[in-house]
Image: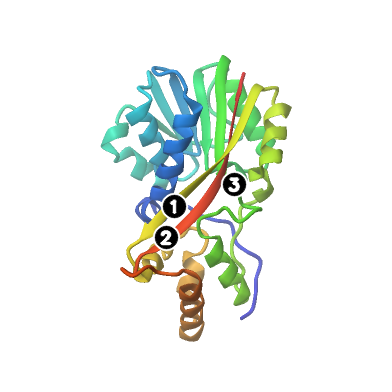
Amino acid sequence: MNTTTPPTIQFTNGAAYERYMGLWSQQVGQAFIDWLDAPSGGRWLDVGCGNGAFTELVAQRCQPQALAGIDPSAQQLDFARARASTAQAEYVQGDAMALPYGAAQFDVAVMPLVIFFLSDPALGVAEMARVVRPGGLVAAYSWDMPAGGFPYALLQDELTSLGVAVPTPPSPQASDMDVLAKLWAGAGLRDIATRDITVQRTYASFGDYWATVQGAPSMGAKLAALSAEHTATLKARLQARLVANAAGEITCAARANAIFGTV
């Protein structure tokens, strides 16, 4: 197959993204919230909130006094606004590198699974630090992209082996733990802490996995464009690597790097 320059990843279907990434996001998000252990009742900002998967966890578990989410995708925000549990949240379409808020308006700002999508991660961290009050928390977690921590890294590998140019985020290196620590220190944050989080997800069958990845913002269009021959080859390669149990279930693991610091 002919390769081309990978296009920009577009997030235009909140429901498809929920099936593809929502459960992954919620699992790692729950572990992250437990670790962050932020005081309840604060003013929270979810930077790059997408379809509201993490915003929902904050609403359910952190008793926020105020809750806001910002994301560039109107379609994702529409899905987020439909979540009954986040009815209190103010969702705004905007840029993580130019947050539409004044200084010191929040107690906690979190960037969940987003920092590698920023063209200038340092600016994104600086913006979070700007809008959080002194003593507040600036935090993030992201799939460890350089080390293969992304939940669908295996699928990316197999598509690449077929000559398919898989779309990639602009700053995958920003999810490396050492890079994250330097970004937080560079923003003047103190008392910086880091940890890795490993989570698992079980798909009912290979058919469930295959249907799920059709909604991938980064790979769905590429999968749809494959020839019948390449689709069969890809499925065979994936099934050889995604070993099913006696019930036909497939369990996959993913790893994220997490960080927080104090303004």
Circle 1 is placed at which residue position?
Answer: 200
Residue drawn at (53%, 66%), measured in percent from left and top? Answer: 155
Q: Quadrant of the C terminus?
A: top right
Circle 2 is placed at which residue position?
Answer: 251
**Residue 95 or 160: which is nearer the viewer?**
160
Circle 3 is placed at which residue position?
Answer: 117
Q: Residue 101 appears at what percent x and percent y?
A: 53, 23
Is residue 39 positioned above or below 160 on the image?
above
Cα separation between marks 1 and 3: 23 Å
**Residue 180 or 118: which is nearer the viewer?**
180
| Residues marked 2 and 1 touching at CB (< 8 Å) | yes
**Which three-letter amino acid code belongs to the residue tagged 3?**
Phe
Cα separation between marks 3 and 2: 27 Å
Q: Is residue 3 left or right of residue 106?
A: right
Element type at mark 3: helix
- Residue farthest to the bottom? 229
Cα separation between marks 2 and 1: 7 Å
